[in-house]
Image: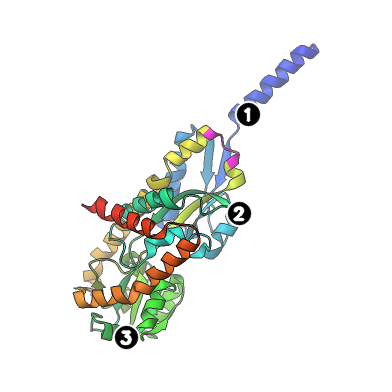
Amino acid sequence: MTLKLALIASTLIVAGSAASAKTRLLVNCFWPSSHFVCSEVLPGWIAEVERVTEGRVTGNIPPKSVAPPPEQLAAVEKGIVDVSISFNGFLSEAIGPEVAMLPFVGNYDPETMSRALWATNRKFFADEIENVHLLSQFVINPGELYSQTDTPINSIDDLANRKMWVLPGPLAAITKSLGTGVVSTPAVKSNEIISRGVVDGHLGLDPQGVQAFQLFPYTKSNTKFEKPLYTTSFSVFANKDKWAEISAEDQAAIMSVSGDVLGAIAGARWKSATDAAVEDYAEAGIEVVAADPAFEQALIEAAAPVTEDWLKRAGDAGIDAQAALDFYRSQVEGAMN
């Protein structure tokens, strides 16, 4: 073979290898493997990524999480995994998405809230998380208020006189400010406290969480507010170096099935799990009680410092905080009208 032919052959081989090269994403999921995020939502997203990139980008999920929930961002930054999800409360630099976790700003439709959060992100804090590539954000069903005694919790006095398990963060701060005795642990440890009778009520878990953590036997009633007291938001992100390996065309294709598309799917699936849990309330003996409007108003007033604190922190971070909050609210309310 002449030198010229050898060079041509070599070029064709390299070109063919490049054309057939694939990027495989290691996609972590910190929930148990049986959880619908790990078994349905993320596999569905991976399938869509493979479809829109015509197989050039594929992915798989490890059988167990490679890191505990608070360390998902670090695992992606270090390249231990390529994609993961984190509760936004664990992301110190992600002040923006806390807008969806402020008291009484959401509703009971996580699909709507997820779309509203992504729209707010794109408009007000799209570049906030700098060390990874943000793929999506979503909101799950609101955390709710439950009594473990035969008496529902339906006034400030009722709540103040209880000893409560409360999700850490804003909810714990609000209830402590009312004089409530608070035991606060991560949600995964809630059963250890609630099942032992250490408390006589709990606040912060959504209905599917109450069911998943096997708390139905210890729960007597659920106080339902017109607007939810608290919601939780999450971010989905990719390692920047791994993302840079993907062509601009395929990056655009992946984002077309991420963003509010993935967020809405996650939110809708969370709602279906919550609806199924609520359907089991009657058999479990859990009564649903409408919150007294005076109780709800008193909690709105008690929660005001949480919103004021976020407005200040977000403003200090360079976010047009009041405009972002107003926009998020308008997106949530507009979608429901």
Instruction: Indicate the amino acid at tag 2.
Output: Glu
Residue underneath mark 2:
77
Contact between marks 3 and 1 (CB within 8 A): the answer is: no
SS class, disc 3: helix
Residue underneath mark 1:
18
Contact between marks 1 and 2 (CB within 8 A): the answer is: no
Of tags 3 and 1, the one toward the viewer is 3
> Whole-percent x and y of residue 60?
52, 46
- Identity of the residue drawn at 49% across and 34% down: 53
Nearer-N-terminus badge (3/1):
1
- Identity of the residue drawn at 48% across and 52% down: 236
> Whole-percent x and y of residue 252?
48, 36
Relative side of 3 to 240, left or right? right
Q: CA distance from mark 1 to mark 2?
A: 26 Å
Instruction: Indicate the amino acid at tag 3.
Output: Ala
SS class, disc 1: helix
Residue count near mark 1 (Cα–Cα under 10 Å), binned few <14, some 14–19, many ≥20: few
210 over 57 or under it: above or below? below
**As rendered, which of 147 and 283 lies closer to the eye?**
147
> Whole-percent x and y of residue 190?
42, 75
Instruction: Indicate the amino acid at tag 1.
Output: Ala
Numbered circle sitting on residue 160: 3
- Identity of the residue drawn at 45% across and 54% down: 38
